[in-house]
Image: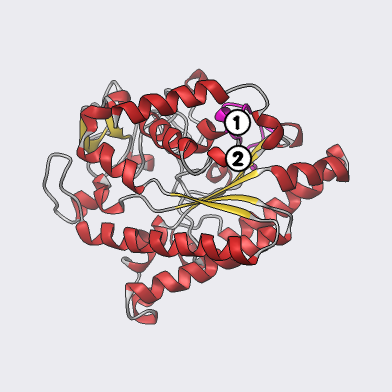
Amino acid sequence: MGSLFASACLLLLIIGGGGAAAKVPAVIVFGDSSVDAGNNNQISTVLKSNFRPYGRDFFGGRPTGRFSNGRIPPDFISEAFGLRPFVPAYLDPAYNITDFAGGVCFASAGTGFDNATSNVLNVIPLWREVEYYKDYQNKLKAYLGDTKANSIISEALYIISLGTNDFLENYYTLPSTRSKFRTVDQFQDFLIGLAEKFMKDIYGLGARKMSLTGLPPMGCLPLERTTNFVNGNGDGCMDGYNVVALHFNEKLSGLVKKMNDEMPGIRVVFSNPYGVFMSIIHKPSEFGFEVASIACCATGMFEMGYMCDQMNPFTCSDANKYVFWDSFHPTEKTSRVIADYVMNHSLREFL
């Protein structure tokens, strides 16, 4: 795995400039906290991260609202395509359409494919992200003119990353959801239907190049290890949750094939982080990590968001040694490894 990481990094160095941006003029992001660049800062929700120690390793040490000590995967992917080294949040008042022309993030931490998921923590539902995207298109056309704007819309890479909350914050948390869907398999099929509708919606709005992201090994998140009393020095995980993630990823992969077969002019790829993420967790030293069982923030077992206070004496001093930043999200270093892997595999055909 170490050699794979090195080769992926070399690939990024090779493609960092040159003509890559001509093929992908913008990176447009939909999803949850795995890709939220700070939209939740502007809404009334407890799920925020616009304070230290979040962002302490970002440019200028700024807490942007990313659930990380630094950058997240879309930032590295944008940079790899020769674009800005981070993707700004659409609701961030520090940016405007001149910034968003080269990439924009509509994601909201805590959301999911199912509207019931976004209701749990009062965050932006996926349908609202689409409404923001429509607003973005109108502003882009007013700024650049229809021809140039439509070119960006059709040639941009659309990153779609969500689903974990649908299971951990919805299906396994809400009795109403489990009573509606007798089995987790039925719930998965329901989510696949929602994912298909979403992709067809943005396809109808001009999107053509899409990356649908699979679920990570969600049973290995420190929060799930803690709440389910799973022991282990990085190897112990909630296996049942991981099995669900694997099965759902198979269905997402099938959806990608269906979309490519049925929708004219579309190109969807399945970006699956599960395998490389599991390798990092099981063999952290091969990727330069020391700790995979707990997170950097506070005790590393259950804290995230406001519980990750900058004054907590237990927060680690060097996040690069840790796979996880808080109990639910990876460190910047882990995000870079995953982004490198995705660039070297599913996204390389867009270069």
Nearest to viewer (mark 2 / mark 1): 2
Main SS type for the magenta part? loop
- Residue 81, numbered circle: 1
Residue at image point 55% right, 48% down: 107
For image coordinates 14% across by 52% down, the residue present is: 230
Tell me: residue 245, above or below residue 77: below
State if disc 1 and disc 2 touch (CB < 8 Å): yes
In the current view of this chain or complex, which residue is farthest to the top? 60
Reply yes or no: does residue 77 show up in magenta. no
Label drawn at residue 154: none
**Residue with the mark numbered 2:** 350
Residues at marks 2 and 1, CA–CA distance in whole angstroms: 9 Å
Q: Amino acid at mark 2?
A: Phe
Looking at the image, is mark 2 or mark 1 earlier in the sequence? 1
**Which segment is the magenta one?**
78-95
Within the image, what quadrant is residue 265 found in?
bottom right
Quarter that holds the N terminus: top left
